[in-house]
Amino acid sequence: MSITNTATPFLPHCPGPLPIVEPQASPTVVATTPAALEFARLEAWLASSHTLQLPLHQIESQQQTKGREVQRLLLQAHLQLRGDGDVGPALLVPHAAGERLYTHRRLRTRCLKTIFGPVEINRMGYSRDGAPSIYPLDQTLALPARSFSYELQRRLVKAAVQNPFHESVEAIADLTGVSVPKRSLEKILRDAALDFDAFYQERAPEPANGSILVAAVDGKGIPMVKPGGAQTTVRLTKGQKANRKRMATVAAVFTRAPWVRTPEQVVESLFRIQRQTPADGQTPPRPENKRVWASLLKGKTAVIKEVAQEMQRRDPQGIKTRVAVTDGDRALQILVEGTLGVTLILDLLHVLEKLWKAAYVFHPEGSLEAELWVLDRTLRILFGEVSQVVKGIRQTSPNAGSSEPSAKRCAALRTTNTAIAHACVMTNISPRVGLSPVAPSRVHARISSRIGWSVRECAGLRRWRSQLRAIYLSGDFDRYWSFHI
């Protein structure tokens, strides 16, 4: 059944002319209402001799619980004033095949859990043979299909994406006094994420002052939780792992204003260097309209295509400088460059990981010599001397004082040489386009870790929670919830 006339979906059907209903004056609240009596009890409790001896924290806790009942009774009284939604002896409903008359009437009571507690709603239902009942009051109040109000669902969903899953139910129960089963929360989260794709497809582009449009794509290994009833292994054999991982593709798109820094300034922000001159007071521009998301099921190609669509939606005229931040995975770099057709940037922190690994081949871990070695190579890379740095590492003897090179040193040097040789050169593009080679890495790392935590906590393939967390991290949660309702 579909209702075509959204402006007046329900039409009362009466045998004669519609009666004229005079507007009623607002009812006055008398002191004998249940809410007023409960409020009087709360006032009496606060003024009692026993309460006057209690410490403040105990008064706060008990007053919150008692005051919640006052709020619930006030809401219940409001719902009674709204009536039962009776629109007449019959209901005429527009359908695609023509109008249909609903003549069977029955008054039913519905229980709804709200942030103040459970309330009862009496509403008139209209039905006909072979069709479900229609309740006009449900549409007037915009009631959800589930037994939890939309506001309670909003708080549950927001708590679930901010905290570990098992703690979100306890947090809401502590704040509202409403206990929600975990299975019900799982269903609420699944339903809440259904409009994820539609929301971003229909959302209008937001204005942004930054001239650089940045995309970030990365992979995040997610431990997979075994399904219920799976046979446990007494002892793992060689090569087996407790949790097999699947790779989730994490993406981000945001706009940034240019922030040009010298290589010395970049190095100062990463190493323990005392400034010779006071700081100029400049602060890095923050990402604008940042959207993040992740997927375990779609794969890298599909997610990168979504990134391309998001960038085109934000910059249809192509007037912004477009760049993409990746790690040292060459296959990912080729896929991103081929799909997006933008300038690739390897964030500097990925390069530093390889440099530190090489430094510990020649110097003790945590030593000042190792730090100075990495500092020198980082500064040279930022000045464009990438090939010289790679050549110097390759020509350095890996046996450093021993008669034979160790396998550990040789493996570390091979990994370092390969990573730096095919990836370091991209960091030189960052200063030319006015994008810091460090800040995107930090933003990207936070996105990857947070969304990865989300997918892992909800047992692998439940992608709906990672989508909701992506909406929250993008700053779109409130707008999305209104769209969802």
Image (cartoon, rainbow, N blue to C red):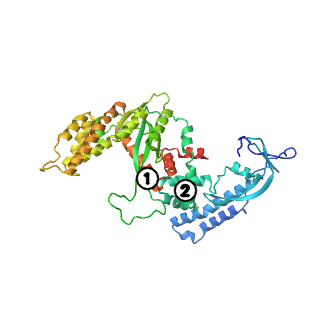
- Please state which amino acid type lies under the numbered disc 2: Glu
Q: Is residue 418 visible?
A: yes
Q: Tell me, for residue 453, which label it has, or none.
A: 1
| Image location (x, y in percent) of residue 399 | 15, 48
The secondary structure type at the circle numbered 1 is helix
Q: Earlier in the sequence, mark 2 or mark 1?
A: 2
Instruction: Using the image as rendered, state which of residue 37 and residue 216 is in the foreground.
Output: 216
Q: Is residue 173 above or below residue 438?
A: below
Residue at point 16%, 49% (across, down): 405
| Image location (x, y in percent) of residue 437 | 34, 38
- Please state which amino acid type lies under the numbered disc 1: Trp
Query: Residue 153 occupies which quadrant of the picture?
Result: bottom right
| Image location (x, y in percent) of residue 117 | 62, 60
Q: Are there few (<14), some (14-19), or many (20+) residues within 10 Å of tag 1? A: some
| Image location (x, y in percent) of residue 234 | 38, 66
Q: Are there few (<14), some (14-19), or many (20+) residues within 10 Å of tag 2? A: some
Q: CA distance from mark 2 to mark 1?
A: 17 Å
Q: Tell me, for residue 186, which label it has, or none.
A: 2
Query: Residue 249 occupies which quadrant of the picture?
Result: top left
Instruction: Using the image as rendered, state which of residue 36 and residue 343 is in the foreground.
Output: 343
Query: Residue 45 occupies which quadrant of the picture?
Result: bottom right
Q: Is residue 451 above or below residue 335?
A: below
- Relative placement, left or right, of 173 versus 29 is left
- Relative placement, left or right, of 238 versus 455 is left
Proximity of marks 2 and 1: CB atoms separated by less than 8 Å: no
Residue at point 44%, 30% (across, down): 320
Q: Is residue 367 visible?
A: no
Residue at point 50%, 50% (across, down): 463
The secondary structure type at the circle numbered 2 is helix
